[in-house]
Structures are given as structure tokens and as C-alpha cells.
Image (spheres, coloured by chain):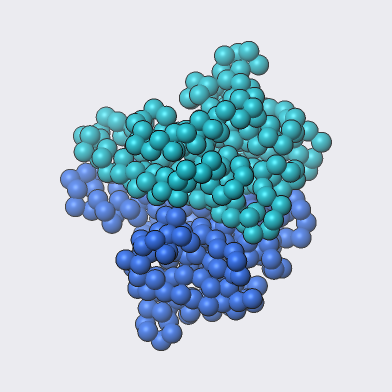
Chain colours: A cyan, B blue
Amino acid sequence: MKPTITAFERSPDRGRGLARDMRVRWALEEVGQPYDVRLVSFQAMKEPAHRALHPFGQIPTYEEGGLALFESGAIVLHIAGRHAGLLPADADARARAIAWMFSALNTVESPIVEREAALLLERDKPWAAQRQPILDERVGVRLRELSSRLGEADWLDGAFSAGDLLMVTVLRRLGGSHLLDAHSNLCAYVARGEARPAYQRAFAAQLAVFTGAA
Amino acid sequence: MKPTITAFERSPDRGRGLARDMRVRWALEEVGQPYDVRLVSFQAMKEPAHRALHPFGQIPTYEEGGLALFESGAIVLHIAGRHAGLLPADADARARAIAWMFSALNTVESPIVEREAALLLERDKPWAAQRQPILDERVGVRLRELSSRLGEADWLDGAFSAGDLLMVTVLRRLGGSHLLDAHSNLCAYVARGEARPAYQRAFAAQLAVFTGAA
């Protein structure tokens, strides 16, 4: 059965692939699972019909037969559990890859989202300039730790996994900043993710929504 | 094989059960799995030996035979996958419970941690008072949405699950504020979690570390 995901009718990132449907598209492309997309407006996201699928009124959601899921991390994990290609077969290696999934979304993404929100919503406040170094450093400490762990490896723990997929999408959110520049291994890691054919198909699909080519 | 987890040698919450080892202790108690605890100091957490287990120098970690895990969400999911009692047997219901796990840690906990960090680290800044309503509202919107979804149900999706376990521990972080007061169903939900015998055993165990009774 072909799943249906939701995505922004008009993505605030103008097709740069930073909205969270990108993660789900990429995972589906990695495992070769075709999918349908239902676009939702900012207004419709907050209405009861969408909130029945997503209690917090966001995208993406995932519908497959009688199953409805929300939270991009949970959706990627569900896809990884149904298909080969996103998690190792060995039980211990699988648990470690899942730890990197949680780590990407909780430990690394949280300060990145906090920084983004400040840039977007507190830009005109009198404290904006003074808080910027504090926010940069909250991200910076995580980047140094991640860079140190990754070292010269291609991926975080052996072969490419759903943990890398999420981590690459999280680090891509820093594209407009220079925070990644200090870590050439993290830049190469992101580029390695973006070079995957499945990534490129997913990116093109979300961009086509924005350009109207879909 | 008995797993070993790590916890703060001296918890900054003075035994209120807000440190993230509480989640893992609670999960282990729910499934009846005995465990050992290794206490780590703030200094030791940042040293190479601990960072080999946890790249971000935090607690908890989880060691079991040759497996080493970090991230409380991943550890709870691992425990839930090995034992009955924390996830439904039905595949769809299981995926939904896992969605609530991600939701608790990403969507609900993130603004709560951001608010806590501001109270702790930016308390003396000139903007502290003016930013407080912004931070409260970022948490408030999530609480209203969560309260609306929970309604009069006991748990988020059918029987108690690892999703509820994480969500209760996340909401407990608001205990020092009045943000939960507007939502009597969320207060009752937290109380329902705290009343579980497994919760109480886990709470007593982490408190004993602080009081020195361990």
C-alpha cells in the first residue's frame, strides 16, 4: 500500500529542503517506497481535520492503510523498520543507529531550532545582538562534540543509517550560518549525505512543490 | 545480563527525579529488569572514558554486554523492545506509541528545556523579564495542544506506554512553574504516572543517591 505524507503547500524555506517532510521523502527514497503527497496550507494545518492526524498541527504526517503517524523521527523509524536499507540487521548496531536518531533530534537539533527561532521571532528585540553569541555557542558545543566523535569516518556508526539521515538534515539547517565552517569533517559529512541518489530524488521532489513543477 | 546505567553523582535537581536517568530507571522498573548504576561526577562526564559511551558527555548511558547506548529516548525504546509492558503488541499501535515518544522529547520537551535554560543561564541578563512571557507561551501552546488531544483519557493512546512514560517525565520538569495549572487533565495525567508502583520505585532509587541512602 502506497503511503501518503503531508508537506507544506508553500514551504517557508522556499524549496531548500529544510522542512521536515524532506526527512521522510529521503527515507522513502532510500528504501525505494513510492508515496503520495498531500499539501496543506498553514491555515489548514491548524484545523481539526489535520490535528486529528497531528495533535500539534505540523507536517509531516504519514498515512498507510489504517495507520496515521506524526513526528518525522517516528515516521523515519517506522519506514526503517518495514524495509531494509536504513538500519543494520545486527541488533546492537541497530540500537546504536536508533540512538543517533534520537541524538540528532534532541541533542543536536534543539539548540539549532532555538537559534533559528530567535533569528526569526526576536530579530527586532533590543537583546537580539547580545544573545546571538550565546545561541551560537549552544550550537557550537554540540558541533565540536559531534565533529570529535565523527572524526574521519564516513558515517556515525559503520554504514549509512537512519541516524545519519536525520543528522544530515539537522546539520543542513545551519546552511545559512557559518557555524559548520570550523568543522571540515562535518561539512564533508553533510555533502556525503546530499550526494546520495535517494537524497537528490527527495530534494527534487520537494523543490518541485515550491517551483510549481510538481 | 544485568544492564548498568549512569546517573549524576550529585543531581542538580536535589533528588526531584528530573534528571534523565529517571526515565530509564522507570522503564526498567516497569518491565521488572534489575539494573546497576554507576555514578559520574560533572567532571568525569566530560572526560574521554565517559565520552566514549556518550559523545555529548551527558547521562544516562546504558551498558549491557557489548552494547553501549546513549540518549534516554533510545534507551527506553531499547528496553521496550526487549521486554513486554511498555509498547503495545499490535504493530500500528506500537508505531503510534513510538510517535508519542518522539513527540515528548522533540515537540514538547524542547521549549521546556529552552525555558529552563533561560531561567538558569540568563537570569541576570537585562532581557530576562521581557523574554519570560515569550518563553512561557512557547511552552503554553504545546500544553494547550497536548491537553486538547488527551481530553479525558487516562493515557495518550490506549494503554500506558513508553510514550506516556516519557511525556510524564517531560511535563514534570514544569513542576516549579504554574504552567500546568491551566490544564487539570494534564495535572491528573502526571499524577497518574507518578502513582504507578514502578515510578515510585524508580523515584526512591534516584532520591536515595541524593540523600546518601543508596
Write the residue at 22% across / 34% down. Answer: A129
Vertical comparison of B138 with B119: above or below: above
x and y, in percent, of residue A95 in the image? 62, 57
Figure quadrant of residue A53: top right
Instruction: Name the residue located 41 percent from the left edge and 79 percent from the top edge.
Output: B209
Q: Is residue B182 visible?
A: no
Q: Residue at x 53, y 21 (%)?
A: A15
**In the image, is A5 to the left or to the right of A186?**
right
All told, the count of numbered labels is: 0
Q: Residue at x 65, y 16 (%)?
A: A214
Front residue (pair A93, A6)? A93
Q: Is residue A98 above or below residue A204?
A: below
In the displayed structure image, the side of residue A111 where residue A21 appears, left or right: right
Instruction: Estimate the x, y position of residue B75 in percent, counting from the top left.
Output: 57, 62
- Residue B14: which quarter of the image? bottom left
In the picture, which quadrant includes the N terminus of chain A?
A: top right
Can the viewer see residue B113 in this picture?
Answer: yes
Q: Is residue B97 left or right of residue B173?
A: right
Q: Position of residue B12 (x, y in %)?
A: 34, 68
Counting from the top left corner in percent of width and height, residue A25 is at 64, 32
